[in-house]
Image (cartoon, grey):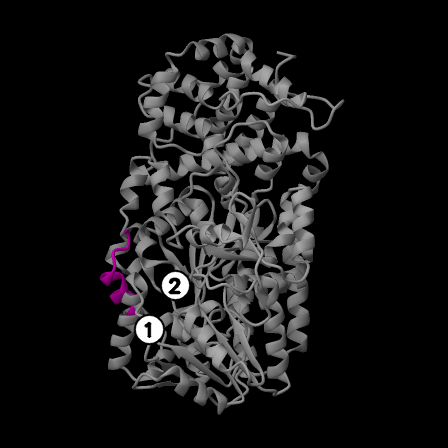
Amino acid sequence: MNDVYAHTPRENGQEWHRLDEHLLSVAEMAQSFAAPFQGGRVAYLCGLLHDLGKFHPLFQEYLKKQADGEMGQSVPHAIWGAALMYQVYWGKMRNRYAWQWFSLPIAGHHAGLHSSHYLSSTLEQSLKEQHFREVLNQAESFLKEFVFPCMQSVENVCSFSETEREMWIRLIFSALVDADYLDTERHFQLELSSLRTPVASITDLWNRFTADQEQLTSRTDDTAVNRMRREVYEECVCAASRPQGVYRLTVPTGGGKTRSSLAFALKHAVEHGLDRVIVAIPYTSIIEQTADVYRGIFGNDAVLEHHSQIEVDDEKEEADERLIQQRLAAENWDAPLIVTTTVQLFDSLFSNRPSKVRKLHNLSRSVVILDEVQTLPTELLKPTLDALAMLVRHCQTTVVLSSATQPFFEESRFLDVFSEIEVKEMLPLPTVNRHFRQMQRVDYEIWKSPVSLLQLVRFIRQHKQLLVVFNTRKEAKECVELLQEDEGVFHLSTLLCGAHRRRILEEVRERLKKNQPVRLISTQVVEAGVDLDFPIVMRQMGPLDRIVQAAGRCNREGKMDKGNVIIFETEDMPSPKGPYRTAMETARFLLAQRHPNDLHDPNIFREYFRRLFASVDVDSKNIQKDRETLDYPLVAEKYRLIDQDTVSVIVPYAEASEYLRMWESSPSRYSFRRLQPYMIQLYRFEAEKQEKDGWLREVADNVYEWLGDYDERIGIKEEVYDPLSLIG
């Protein structure tokens, strides 16, 4: 066993990575990662067996050729540990499907989680192969000393429901993959591995936060808005000592819910001995703003901002060091405070790819804040809420549903999965209603007839400062082009990279403060959570919650008597499809029956979402059935918050080129983080076309460099499709 290895040396002359040490180290780490959700022993066995196939002489020969710089033929190694557990457990336990707990994670730790049906038939064939018997012979002493003694002490997880079992296996898979990546990183990139020690604990963050809150309180004016924000903050801190579970935080736009929800989360984590806080936000524009605020409080190293993700070719089992380094660059959310997108969170939660699923075990023993929770796609709500319920019931996770426009999921008979969990109000409902009455800072106006873009532009020119929010990038861009000769015209969309949007927002805020002309033409990226304060906001007709969120950018600080929010339609306004159209028509129906200023009443959203959930299929792709049969690839294919594949594109803005060369010369999660602010997302089909036309260069799987023009106002210049709604 002493001459059997898991990995080649990092450089000539250095030590090889011994296989027995690797298997034991991965087993111990995986066990600790899975302990919070009662999966420790299962994960330990998976760790011991995940690279069992590397005991075979053919794999050892392949490693030696790799070390000598030769192009050896890769030898599959992940299937054999899975085959052993299938052989041992099939039909031999009261739960005849117990083999799935082990075989699915082990077989998938490179290629991704297979479907149970496919893997079963594959393993049946593997058991008949001579290669399998040779692996067992070579690994005999290791199996006898470490593996077989553990097989009698495996937890019984039969009490899980079918969909809970599906998620539990994915979490075991996450624990295994992360442990494997971490131990491999320790061998190949020891200096990077040592940087993983958190710079601050949750308690440290809470202490820094309270100190910052005291300073903030001492320097803010005693206005009605600030008094309400302080009251919200104090209520959230008081609620933090209550038991773990699901909490709802309902605060009017501009009421300080971002800061107060973090106060709850940090204090709650300290009270219950939890490991981290994860803030999931629907738009990258809000992430950039929120992460900047958090860094100002806690320091750069304490906050992980994660929205773009390297997609490596997980299916390969080669020992090529560069491919291994790209795998290791995937994030595992081991920081105490993570700011991410809802796309990154939920697409990962239903993924079958190792690089995406790696981080999921760190959702356990965490507080997860879902900011602007109403933006979750209605057609995916049933599996989404079911997964959250699993985390709350079995993983020591607390979930915070934060919004000014609360959907009240548990009141819908179509979301019975979530109705079984008590949702605790962070603020008493009478207090919430009082806050909404106090925060009536705008008057709503609905234009009765559609207008042309030229008419709209004439209206815009009559006003010194206003924000206009369109449903699509196309109309926003056309409006900007008509205004391009005017003073103080700015544009925001997802085709501008994060660093660029951040600079524009800084300039817009500065001009607002100095009472200079500023007309901001934007897509939906600006309408929730972005800290702007305009006297006039115009919002194209859309879902009711989107209209109110956009209104939160109007008279935000309450310095005017009333701001003005105008709801308009254009003559050539594209007709949306699917759930967005249903939501828009539901909003139209309610607005036709009510006075526009009824939008100040939080109870209107109870009615709105009740109607909306009854009008759409909350599991339109039948994902729950596929989860019950453990068809992981099909679930991953169907569950997409953005319905089509997207890729990350690095644009030539500011220091992007410098950071790209740095990442290409030494791929790591640290160099990749430097690139995130310079990325946009494009649909895959559009990226493939642009690559053929010479506008894109692939620098890694699903990561491209933009070779065309990048405009200071509208971003990338070639006409491309814009992935709308939730951008990750």
Question: Residue 227: x percent and y percent?
Answer: 55, 78
Residue 16 shows up from this direction:
yes
Identity of the amino acid at label 2?
Gln
Question: Magenta segment range?
Answer: 608-619
Is residue 616 located in the magenta-colored stretch of the structure? yes
User: Quarter of the image holding residue 548?
Assistant: bottom left
Residue 190 appears at what percent x and percent y? Answer: 71, 34
Above or below — where is 511 with respect to 506? below
For badge 1, the amino acid type reads Asn
183 or 369, which lies in front?
183
Q: CA distance from mark 2 to mark 1?
A: 14 Å
Decide which of tag 2 and tag 1 comes sooner along the chain.
Answer: 2
Q: Position of residue 48 (x, y in %)?
A: 53, 22
Residue drawn at (68%, 59%) of the image: 655
SS class, disc 2? helix
For residue 327, above or below residue 687: above
| Mark in front: 2 vs 1 | 2
Q: Main secondary structure of the magenta part?
A: helix
**Which residue: 40% across, 12% down?**
129
Category of crowding for the residue at label 2, using alpha-carbon neighbours closer than 10 angstroms: few (below 14), some (14–19), many (at least 20): many
**Residue positioned 61% across, 20% down in the render:** 63
Q: Which residue is mark 1?
A: 603
Which quadrant would the N terminus be assigned to in this image?
Answer: top right
Residue 265 to residue 2: above or below: below
Measured as percent of width and height from the top left, residue 482 is found at 48, 81
The relative height of residue 682 versus residue 446 in the rendered view (above or below) is above
Q: Which mark is residue 439?
A: none
Instruction: Depth check: give the residue in front, 353 or 576.
Output: 576
**Which residue position is annotated with label 2?**
374
Q: Is residue 490 left or right of residue 674?
A: left
Is 345 left or right of 500, judged from the image as shown? left
Element under disc 1? helix
